[in-house]
């Protein structure tokens, strides 16, 4: 099985809601960072990709039809080339709300995990810290303006790289219609998923 949908949007742009939406539309399963906590053996592949730039993606995604959120969004361009028939979804939110959410949720969670006494959690934290906070944001995620610039630059790079007929620029507030039209699916008779707010993340 190869990927049918590639999520190019950074984490905290409604990616968990998008995962649930895609699975509702039949794209089962959809990869998300949360998968790593249920499939810790996958970290071997992700560490290899971080060290070498790639890994055996077909094997890693053998049970998946879509991938969103980090770490997958870090490799969106490679996936777009590897799976030329896959459609690309660039999930967005306002840059200011995005960076504020990051600072309240996944960034402090990673830092806390780096101090953990649990070797498995600490290993995950070292890898994710390198991939996201060091490689993507050059260790400057706490600088809001710099982080927003990286966020905006990423958006423009995706827009320039992926042809318009293959790309959906999407916000969770858009709801089902544009997503279903893009993926040629029927609109479910239920509300679009709304999960993983900053408050929900903090409670977990």
Image: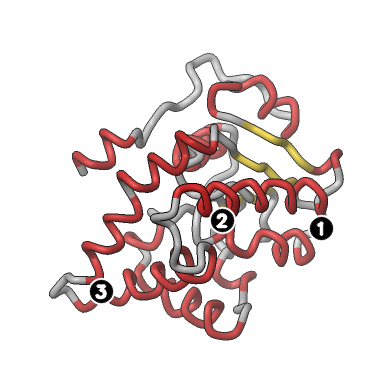
Q: Nearer the viewer, mark 2 or mark 3?
A: 3
Q: Residue 162 location, x and y as percent? A: 81, 50
Circle 1 sits on which residue? 84
Residue 112: x percent and y percent?
A: 21, 62
Left or right: 165 in relation to 88: right
Q: CA distance from mark 2 to mark 3?
A: 26 Å
Residue at x 75% of width, y 59% of height: 80
Q: Residues within 10 Å of mark 1 (few under 14, many from 20)?
A: few
Depicted 27 relative to depicted 67: above or below: above
Asked if residue 84 can be seen in this view, the reply is: yes
Q: Separation of disc 3 and disc 1 at Cα?
A: 36 Å
Query: Quarter-wise, where is residue 89 in the image?
Result: top right
- The residue lying at 73 percent from left, 47 percent from top is 156
- State the image coordinates of residue 28 (x, y, percent, origin top left): 54, 46
Q: What residue is pinned by disc 3?
A: 122
Query: 132 above or below 176?
Result: below
Q: Earlier in the sequence, mark 1 or mark 2?
A: 2
């Amino acid at each position: 099985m190869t990927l049918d949908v590639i999520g190019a949007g950074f984490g905290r742009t409604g990616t968990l809601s998008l995962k649930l939406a895609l699975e509702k539309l039949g794209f089962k399963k959809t990869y998300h960072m949360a998968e790593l906590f249920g499939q810790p053996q996958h970290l071997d592949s992700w560490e290899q990709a971080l060290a070498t730039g790639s890994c055996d993606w077909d094997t890693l995604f053998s049970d998946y039809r879509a991938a969103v959120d980090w770490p997958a969004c870090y490799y969106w361009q490679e996936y777009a080339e590897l799976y030329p028939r896959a459609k690309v979804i660039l999930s967005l939110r306002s840059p200011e709300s995005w960076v504020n959410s990051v600072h309240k949720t996944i960034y402090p969670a990673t830092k806390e995990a780096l101090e953990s006494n649990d070797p498995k959690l600490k290993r995950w934290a070292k890898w994710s810290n390198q991939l996201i906070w060091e490689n993507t944001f050059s260790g400057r995620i706490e600088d809001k303006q710099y982080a927003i610039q990286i966020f905006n630059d990423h958006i423009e790079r995706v827009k320039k790289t992926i042809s318009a007929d293959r790309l959906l620029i999407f916000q969770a507030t858009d709801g089902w219609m544009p997503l279903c039209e893009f993926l040629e699916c029927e609109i479910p008779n239920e509300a679009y998923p709304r999960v993983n707010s900053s408050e929900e993340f903090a409670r977990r």
